[in-house]
Amino acid sequence: MVKSCIKISIIVGFMAFFLTSVVNAKDSGWKEAQNKMFEKIGLKSGEVIGKDNWKKVEGLVPDDMVKWVREGKVIMNIGEFGYDASNDAEWDEYGLKHNVGKYSLNKEGVIIETATGKYPKWVYGYPFPDIDLKKDPDAGIKFMHNRDITRGRDGSFKSPFTVEWIGKDGFERVLQNNYYRYNFWGTTETKDDGNANDMMFMEVTVVVAPYDVSGTAQLTYRKIDGSDDQLYVYIPAIRRTKRMSGANRSDPFLGSDFTVDDGNGWLGHTSSMDWKNI
C-alpha cells in the first residue's frame, strides 16, 4: 500500500504568538518575540514532525491533525514567519485616528454609523479599534467585525487553489480552481466609488480542471446590511445558472468534504452568530 504523506508548512511561531497575545504591528521586536515563542513551545524552524515525534505538536494543532501525524499519514515541516508585520502600522493607526466611536452595532449586530444609524458605504481600518475586551459585552462580535474588515485589505485579487482527495491508498483526484474577490470595505481602492449597490464584497470561484466539471462557477454577493448572501451557480453541463441559498455556507464543494467557509475559516455573517470573548 502506498503511504500518503501531505507536507504542510506551518507558521507555528506566528500562529501561536498571535493566538496567545496581542500583536502590535508597530513592534520592531516581532521577530524576537517569535523566537521566544519557538523556545516556549519547543519547536525549531526546519524541524520535521512525523510519527516518531508527534507529541511535539500535541495541543498546537487540531486533534485530528495530531492523529494523522501519529499514524504517519501527515508530515509537518515547521517554518518561521518571515513577514515584517511592522508595515501594518498605517492600518492600525487609521482606525485609532478616525474610527473611535464612529461605528456601533444595531440590534442584529450589524455595523452601523453611530451618528446616522445607517449602514456605512465604506469602512477602512478597524471599525472598533479600542475594544474593552474585559468589560464590553459586545467585545466578541466587535473583534470578529474587525477581523472581517481585514480581509478587504487586498482590494481585488485572484487566487488559484486546488481541492485534493487523498485516501488511505494515496492520491485520488484533484480540482483546479481560480478564486476572484472584489472588496468594497477594508481597501482604499473603493473609497470614492460610492458603493451604490451596498456591497461588502463580491467573489467568484471557477473550476478550471478536470474537463468534466471545468467552467462550473459560483458567484456570491455579500451586502452590508447583514442579509443572506446572493449566491448563483453556473453549471456548464446544462448551460444554466441557478440561484442557490446563501444561508447555508456549510454545503460541500463539488462532492468534497471542503465547504464554502473552509478557505477562510469563517466567512459567514458575523451578525448571524453569538460571540463571546473568553
Image: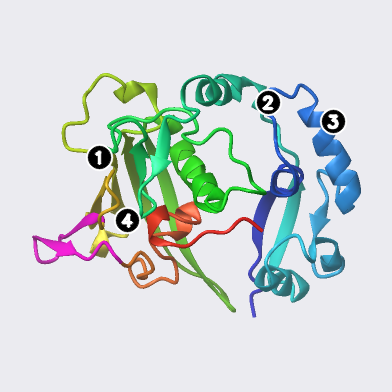
Q: Is residue 174 magenta?
A: no
The secondary structure type at the circle numbered 2 is: loop
Residue with the mark numbered 4: 209
**Residue 236 x %, y %:** 15, 60
- Left or right, 148 with respect to 65, comes to left
Amino acid found under the numbered disc labelled 4: Ala
| Residue range corresponding to the magenta coloring | 229-247
For marks 4 and 2, the one nearer the N-term is 2
Q: Residues within 10 Å of mark 1 (few under 14, many from 20)?
A: some
The secondary structure type at the circle numbered 4 is: strand
| Residue in front for this viewpoint, 261 or 180 | 261
CA–CA distance in space, label 4 to label 1: 30 Å
Quadrant of the snapshot with the N terminus = bottom right
Amino acid found under the numbered disc labelled 1: Met
Q: Residue at x 75, y 40 (%)?
A: 80
Residue 57 found in image quarter? bottom right
Residue with the mark numbered 3: 32
